[in-house]
Amino acid sequence: MYGTLMIGRPAVDIDKMKEATRAWADDRGEAVGFVDERVLMADDGRIAVAVRFASREDYERLAEDPKQDAWWSEVMAPMLDGEPEWIDGEWTDL
């Protein structure tokens, strides 16, 4: 599996972010190869969002989609306080 970990600080209530994500998924439909997504709400106020895809190709297909980029730039990025950190790579079980 391949995916990303986004670490950032929300500027809005997490429920607003969840609502926006669900609405986008409903509009877009399920992305090819999407496996799952989880959010860690850290004690220090940051969030870590883990997104996994079946393959690197599936992940890159979504990452390179202009509609996905527009949604991120116009909807999600403004809900964060500053630029998030992104860590892309292979997911594996221990």
Image (spheres, helix red, strand yellow):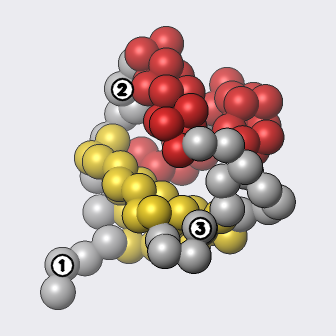
Marks 3/2 in contact by CB < 8 Å: the verdict is no
Pick the quarter of the image with the N terminus: bottom left
View extreme (bottom): residue? 94
Q: Which residue is mark 1?
A: 93
Q: Nearer the viewer, residue 82 or 13?
A: 13
77 vs 28, left or right, is right
Between circles 3 and 2, the one closer to the viewer is 3
Residue 12: image x %, image y %?
A: 67, 43
Asked whether residue 88 is in view, the answer is no
Is 28 situated above or below 51? above
52 vs 49, left or right, is left
Between discs 3 and 2, the one toward the N terminus = 2
Between circles 1 and 3, the one closer to the viewer is 3
Q: Residue at x 78, y 56 (%)?
A: 81
Residue 11: image x %, image y %?
A: 73, 49
Dot 1, crowdedness within 10 Å: few (<14), some or many (≥20)?
Answer: few
Q: Residue at x 57, y 76 (%)?
A: 44
* Distance CA(mark 1)–CA(mark 2): 24 Å
Dot 2, crowdedness within 10 Å: few (<14), some or many (≥20)?
Answer: few
The circle drawn on residue 84 is: none
The circle drawn on residue 30 is: 2
Is 24 situated above or below 6? above
Residue type for callout 3:
Arg
* Distance CA(mark 1)–CA(mark 3): 24 Å
Between discs 1 and 2, the one toward the N terminus = 2
Q: Which residue is mark 3?
A: 46
5 vs 36, left or right, is right
Residue 24: image x %, image y %?
A: 52, 22
Residue type for callout 1:
Asp
Q: Nearer the viewer, residue 56 or 27?
A: 27
Check disc 1 and report its element: helix, strand or loop: loop
* Distance CA(mark 3)–CA(mark 2): 27 Å
